[in-house]
Image: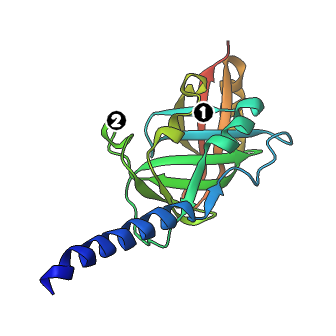
Amino acid sequence: MRKYLKYIIIGLLGCLIYLIFFSSIFKERVKILERYNFNNGSWFIVKGYYNDSIQYVIDDKDILNKLKDKWTLYKSDDNFATTGGYNIEIYNDSGRVMFMDIINDGWLSINTSGILSNSDYGTLYYNNLIWVNSFNDKWIKARQISKQFVNNDSMDEYLDSLKVDNKVYILYYGDSNNGNYMKCLVMKKK
């Protein structure tokens, strides 16, 4: 038996390498932005820590279309509850169409693999978070504002006053149980 132990170990290692190699090759790839036609309508992507006062936005249609190839992840069978707080949201005509929650502990997480929760695909796997920073110089810094109003008229007046000197990205606009509520991103016009 001892005579064959070496061959058994080599065989087991070979099987293990084979399984790891082929399972990584045949994971189902998901281009998470593929289904969106960024050429029609008003689109923007927002990323940042949940309810942070500073968020980052891309609204350039050319860059959004280039991100389609960069943002490729893999389907995962893992299920988890996430409390990462780092979100990526996609908006079309001021309505959110996709939400991703990523567990991100800052710059240390950039080169580590992980999983994320995606509103369209469920749980996805990534090798690292470098894809999140694609076209890093194109992300525009914007200030997040959340406000509650007595009525729609006062909310509309406030939005109009913001739009005079700023570009405004509306994240939420409407009624809540406690009155009218608005959440938007604001950046100075160039």
Identify which residue is drawn at 52% across, 40% down. 132
Measured as percent of width and height from the top left, residue 23 is found at 49, 67
Measured as percent of width and height from the top left, residue 6 is found at 21, 73
The amino acid type of the residue labelled 2 equals: Trp
Which marked residue is nearer to the observer: mark 2 or mark 1?
Answer: 2
Q: Quadrant of residue 56?
A: top right
Q: CA distance from mark 2 to mark 1?
A: 19 Å
Seen as rendered, the residue at the extreme top is 190
38 above or below 26? above
137 above or below 183? above
Which quadrant of the figure contains the N terminus? bottom left
- Disc sitting over residue 57 in the figure: 1
Which quadrant of the figure contains the C terminus? top right
Q: Is residue 68 left or right of residue 150?
A: right
Q: Nearer the viewer, residue 116 or 112?
A: 112
- Disc sitting over residue 107 in the figure: 2
The residue tagged with tag 2: helix, strand or loop? Answer: helix
